[in-house]
Image: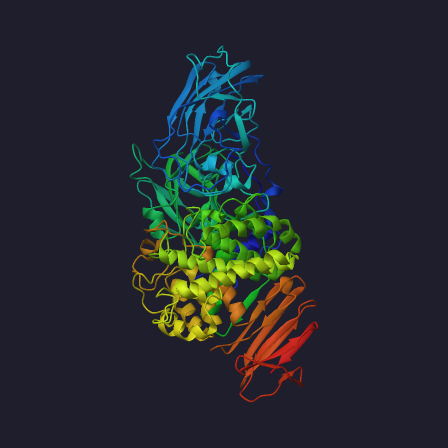
Amino acid sequence: MQRRLLQPLALLCLAFFCFQAALAQDGGISKIPLGQLDPARTVAQPQLFSSFHKPLPEQYIWTREDSAVGQSTFIRYERPGVNDKTAPHYFRVSFNVSAVPKGATLYIAGPHSVTAYVNGTLAGHVVGNNLNPLGMHVFQMNVAHLLKPGQNVLALQVVRGRGVHGFLNSALAMQQVFGEILVAKIIPAAPGVDAPAILISGPQWKGTLHASSGWQRPDYDDSAWPTVAALSPIEGSIDLLQWNADAGLYDWPGYEGASPFLAHMYLPAAKVDDVQTGRSSFENLDALTDASPSGDFAVKLGNIAPGTEFAPEITLDFGREVNGRVEFVSDSDSQAVVSIQYGESKGAADNEPYLGVNVLRIPPHGSAHGPKSAFRYARIRFLAGGPDLKFKTIHLEDIYYPVKYEGSFESSDPLLNRIWETGAYTVHLCMQDDIWDAPKRDRGRWMGDTDVSGHVSDTIFFDHFLLKDTLSHLIGDAPVQQHVNGIPGYSSFWLTELENYERHTGDTAYLRQVHARLVQLLDFMDKEFNAQNQFIDRTGAWLFVDWAPELNGDTPEARIATTMEYARAYLAGAALLRQIGDNATAAHFETRAAQLKQALQHSAWSQANGDFGPRWQTNAMAVISDVANPSQYPSIWNYVLSHVGEPTIRPNVITPYYGAYVLDAMAKMNHRADALKWIREYWGGMIDEGATSFWEAYDPAWPKGNPHASLQADNGTGYFVSLAHGWSTSPTYWLMEQVLGIQPTAEGFSKTIIRPDLVDLKWARGQEPTPHGLLKVDLRNQNGMVASIDLPAGVNTTVLFPITKGASSVTVNGTPRKGRLAEKGSRMAITLDQPGHYELR
């Protein structure tokens, strides 16, 4: 298909120069200079999809008797099986053709099987492969010879598609996820060539589950058939771009499948690897690693029939995890047929590509692209065409959300700098059609993930739109009658991330907008307890704390940890309610938080063992939720959390996700040095094993020969585990909060604590965006800490500055200033309430 013009050359070359310079040696992350991990970071003028693409008008339709749109939006963690709901659905439409074109292609997507008739003559019968990971396929049929001038009739018999695993509080999206959709159009051109359609699916179509004999004939009387349920244009809702549900539309003519606020750029491969010529040959392979190649890349196909055993193939290595798709731009006079398979690791691309092996047909002098996904490697096989195939380019179309890196962190430790940047890039990869858990799997909104990645986004990107849109979709419309994502703990995290967002932005208008739903959510959450304030899961929800034994599913341990998450959330909700003056409801949930704490202290605290059980996750949540008293911190540390970082054995498995709350707990208990050590070992361990973004799961003790194949998450092991997961990025915000010390404590930085702590570093510096401008901190160890702080107007700050024992003042801009002693006399609280530059020592 023909696609948009390339970006302005200057922008493309700038991005390419940084990209190639970053990958000059072997494409390893250790060779990528700091500041150049994210290829989109230097793009000054992003090219938005809205600037070149108009959403397609064809609509998803379905029989009205079986449509779920307008019905319940309750999340269901099950979907029809492959052999369920296989009754045929029948569709008919009449359309006019003024003149029969030389070529005409019927495109159909959504169903698993299709039998199509044009004017009563069989156009084709196709059946999809249920073993293919894609939930839908695009079926093509040549129908030019069946058309006639004037009135024509298309009649279809279809069986619903296999669908994909996906869970949303959107009836529209769930119908797509379940495969109960159909989209169709006829284009007056050869297959793969885009042109204005002469027929598209829409509300004028008719459909039924009960067709009588002769339903396919053009003279059949369908007046008794109801019109279809016209669900939505296929690019008409962001909910239709979730969960890889639309991945199979990669070869639908004109389909972009990207929200209008996203941007794209083109990047060449960093390296061409695993070159296998078979009976064929390649020319000018170097063109594939050049943004402006001087000539075409060419393939001279030998005899590869009847199978693909001798098909020539290559692997493109893009040098790091990326999000987007591979695009082919043909310079051939004939169609080219290729297959493509992606992998976040080399092993995944070769052995178990998450989206399977997908075939592309590239029209002469046209273009085509593979599915959207996250990957580093793309394995390409050249199957047919030519025999001389030429390509102007085969490159990455990088798809990204345009934001600026407003926040920054840099220190005397290069590994920490790399960890910070890798976390920031990972979150940026997850910022797509809303904030996703991951750009490969699940490509969906999960609130637990967003509690971490949203925190990073607030701290670095200061983005409002995407986070608010994500939170709004996650809670759904009023009235709130279910848990966020169907998980009680994720309802809690909706509240804690909203509080974090408000502290960073002061966006009271949004808080007022969601006020009613916030209270409804709190009330719904509170139904889960009995009279003794014990969590009893009245709603029968899925309890999930972490991918670890006894913390996934309805177990005593999961109930205890979920109750702690609730206590933390009730306090966050109360703070939000006080921000907008709902003091009565706030007071109620402050009381409820205290009651939950009292119940947990009675039922979960072991006086004999001095802990809330042996699990890291539970004890960490006890600390950060204020369920644990400060007097209990020493024994929690000694008996449980001091073992963080030691080799783990079941059940002490922890994901990077709950590692966020462990890090926060360690800081709250004043064990920042231990936390920093763990960051270097755990997140640094991923980088040592080749990570260019942070993985969904990790344990330093897992096998190293093929680390991706050994990762464990989502009750499984293997290549399906994501290598770019937003919930794994907590060190990025942690370093800014606990080393630079920047911690907003009230809406919009109206109250802020800066508690600088170099721990074992010689220096550290960075900045964080506020609604009033950048707050900058520069720390140096010069026989004691020296801090430079730049405060924008409107930011009132208490600096908790380290002092020597017995000191009575801190020097501020050369003048001694007294303050309140804090942290057992080890720090002094100095108030800075005017904008400007401050030097403290």
Asked whether 722 or 396 is in front, the reply is 722
State the residue lying farthest toward the top. 219
Q: Is residue 146 left or right of residue 742?
A: left
Q: Is residue 552 left or right of residue 49?
A: left
821 lies above or below 694? below
Residue 209 in percent (x, y) is at 44, 21
Q: Tell me which corner region of the image, top left, top right, bottom left or bottom right, holds residue 635.
A: bottom left
Asked whether 751 or 674 is in front, the reply is 751
107 lies above or below 747? above
682 lies above or below 343? below
Q: Kindly tell me whether residue 683 is visible in this rendering.
A: no
Residue 190 in percent (x, y) is at 48, 27
Residue 767 in percent (x, y) is at 59, 68
State the residue lying farthest toward the front. 531
Q: Tell me which corner region of the image, top left, top right, bottom left or bottom right, holds residue 807.
A: bottom right
Quadrant that contains the C terminus: bottom right
297 lies above or below 774? above
Residue 65 in percent (x, y) is at 48, 25
